[in-house]
Amino acid sequence: MVKFVRASMKGWKYAEEHTDEAAGIVLENDATGAQTEEHQKRMMGEIAKLTAGSNGALDEADYKRTVDSLLKGGSDPVISKEPVGAFTHEITEAALK
């Protein structure tokens, strides 16, 4: 898991720094032909806003907000109880070493 997270963080950082290339990679792998260069460049810019300055660690408040949203599904919640032991920085911390 640490290797996966480390590689993901490296990939997102690279995409943040090379948005045109990242958009091109998506286009090259779009078998449907539905994507456009303009759209992908815009999306890479939006992703860059999310990843800029981040070390890749999930914010605990964001995690809690997501769990709360998943629990509040009315008659059909996505989850029925709060996960136990699901939040940790252990993997991210190891990936940053």
Image (cartoon, rainbow, N blue to C red):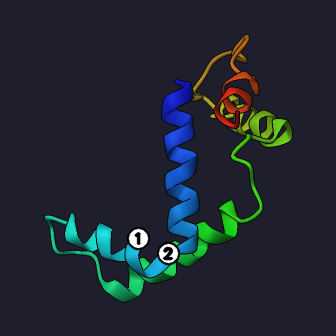
Residue 23 horizontal side relative to residue 85, left or right: left
Q: Residue furthest front?
A: 97
Q: Residue furthest bottom?
A: 38
Q: Amino acid at mark 1?
A: Ala
Q: Quadrant of the C terminus?
A: top right
Q: How many marks?
A: 2
Viewer-nearest residue: 6 or 58: 6
Residue under the point 26% across and 73% down: 27
Viewer-nearest residue: 33 or 49: 49
Q: Residue furthest right?
A: 61
Q: CA distance from mark 1 to mark 2?
A: 6 Å
Viewer-nearest residue: 31 or 92: 92
Residue under the point 54% across and 51% down: 10
Residue under the point 21% across and 64% down: 29
Give the residue number, with chain letter if any, for mark 1: 22
Give residue 95's quadrant in the image.
Answer: top right
Instruction: Report if the CB atoms under discs 1 and 2 are less than 8 Å apart.
Output: yes
Residue 72, given in percent of the width and then of the height, sits at 70, 33
Q: Amino acid at mark 2?
A: His
Give the residue number, with chain letter if any, for mark 2: 18
Give residue 31's quadrant in the image.
Answer: bottom left
